[in-house]
Every structure is written in C-alpha cells, then in structure tokens.
Image: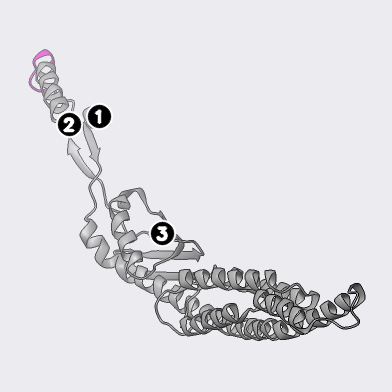
Amino acid sequence: MIKSMTAYGRGQAPAGEGSWIVELRCVNSRFLDPHLRLPSALMGLEDRVKKYLGERLTRGRVNLTLDASGAVKTPPRLVLNRPLVREYRRVLEELKQELGSQADPGLAPFLSNRDLILVEETTPDLEAIWLTLEPALAQALDEAEAMRRAEGAALAQDLGERLARVEELFRQAAARSPEIVENYRQRLSERLARLGELPEVDPQRLALEVAMIADKCDVTEEAVRAQSHVEQFRAFLGKPEPVGRKLDFLIQELNREANTMGSKSPDAAASQVIVEIKTELERIREQVQNIE
C-alpha cells in the first residue's frame, strides 16, 4: 500500500538520570531531505542519524529535533593549573622565610584564585550514547510510519475514485470520435450540395473527404495508451515500495494523451470532456505529490 510523506512521530527513551526525546515532522519533497537539531555535544552523531533515517525513509523533508533532557549531563573534569601551583608554592616558601617558619597563611587565600583549578570539558562517549538514543529514534520513526500508512490508505482510496472517473471520461472522449466523423459527413454533404452545380453530391468525393477526417479524428491509439496508463497507475497503488515518482510520470503521460485527443476532436462536446479529464488529472497530480 502506498504511503504518504506527511507524518509526525515522537519517541522517548531513558538515559542516565534523564531521557531522550525525539520528534519527527515529515512533509513532501522530491528527495530525502533531513534537517537535524542536535545538542552541540552530539554533532558527531549527525551523519549516523541521517543514515538511520535513510534506512527507513526514501523521500520527504524530515525535521528532527533531539532533546537531551538530562541524558548527556557529562560532568566536567577539574584539573590543577600546575604551572600556577608551582608559582604559588614558590611564593609560599618565600613568605615563610620572611615571616618565620611558624607563619602559615593556609591554603584558603590561594584556593580562592579561580585560575588555580581549571574546568576541562569531557568528550561524551558517542557509542554509548547511541545505544540509548537509538530506541527513541526507532519509536519516533514507528509512529511516523503508522501515520504515513494511514494517510497513504486514505490517499489510495481517493485516487482510486478519481482514477475511475478519469477512465470513464477517456471512454467518453473515445466514443465521440465516430459521432464527430458522422456529423462532419453530414455537414460536408449539405455544404457540397448547396455549393455544387449538380443536384447530387459525388459519392466518391464525399467518401474521400470523410475518410480523411475520420483518420484525423481517430483517437483509438490514444485511448488504448490512456487505458494502459490507468491500469498501471491502479496497480502501483497496491505496491509496497515507493511509487510516487512513477505515479507522477503516469500523470504526465495521461495529460499527453488527453492533449492529443483534444487536438483531434474539433467538437465542443468532446472538448468539454477533455477539459474535465485534465481537471481531474490535476487534482490527482496534487495528491500524488504527497506520496512517497
């Protein structure tokens, strides 16, 4: 069954003292176009997340937001500024010599200097993080997949109904061809009878003219090709793999057949049918843009 490209999914998984929260918003696009919003500490996982999305999705713009709600609170590492410590020790030794060995100012005055102890940011373990993050991604994609399938089923039903209407309109357009030829024969016969000097029209001349217009108005080939395209379209609606581009191509081909039939049908009633066909095809085309 076809799937829509429009979907929303949310996933959550525990991690450390917090949890991962993943949100997916998918809309239609010609190609897979992921846009990620990750915490700065996890930018190293960007390519991995995109690859993971590509294993489940083939088309659509995907906006993914990852909230590390307490999940990656990696504590900073405190380190001594050793060159500065050595300077403090030197100064402390000199101070003791000046004031006497019994004088001990203690460490408090020195520890109040923020430059003595440095804060070093630690690098998160991306492999360990991925193990806890992947379930949240999977859950978000599962929810989005369920929505895409549900909307795809609704699209398939709507497209099936519109396709049946297009099929009937093509039949009507093809059925007009013999009537167009007969109407032309009658008008030509009357015109020749009015303009000719002879009381009767030459049957051979009339037959030749009618044969020429019948050949010009024959839309059998176009009708056969249109029917083939309709049948292919209907078959693709039941395929499990992505078929959006194929359906879009078939709509273009059906429009081509409709245009050719319209140019071969110099008749107001036939032209009206062609207009209805193209109107319905445009509605189908708009729906197809949402199919993966």
In screen coordinates, is 53 left or right of 184?
left
In screen coordinates, is 237 left or right of 202?
left
Nearer to the camera, 229 or 97 = 229
Q: Are marks 2 and 1 in contact (CB under 8 Å)?
A: yes
In the image, is residue 205 part of the stretch drawn in magenta? no
Q: Which quarter of the picture shows residue 117?
A: top left
The chosen color scheme is one colour
Residue that carries the numbered disc 3 in the rendered image: 67
Q: Position of residue 157 (x, y in %)?
A: 58, 85
- Helix or strand or loop: what does disc 3 sit on? strand
Query: Mark 2 and mark 1: span between their CA atoms?
Result: 7 Å
Q: Are marks 3 and 2 in contact (CB under 8 Å)?
A: no
Disc 2 crowd rating (10 Å Cα; few below 14, some 14-19, many 20+) is some
Q: Position of residue 230 (x, y in %)?
A: 55, 82
Comes first in the chain, label 1 or label 3: 3
Total count of labels: 3
- Helix or strand or loop: what does disc 2 sit on? loop
Q: Which stretch is magenta?
A: 97-103
> Looking at the image, is 12 positioned above or below residue 100?
below
- Labelled disc at residue 115: 1
Query: Mark 3 and mark 2: span between their CA atoms?
Result: 34 Å
Q: Residue at x 9, y 20 (%)?
A: 93
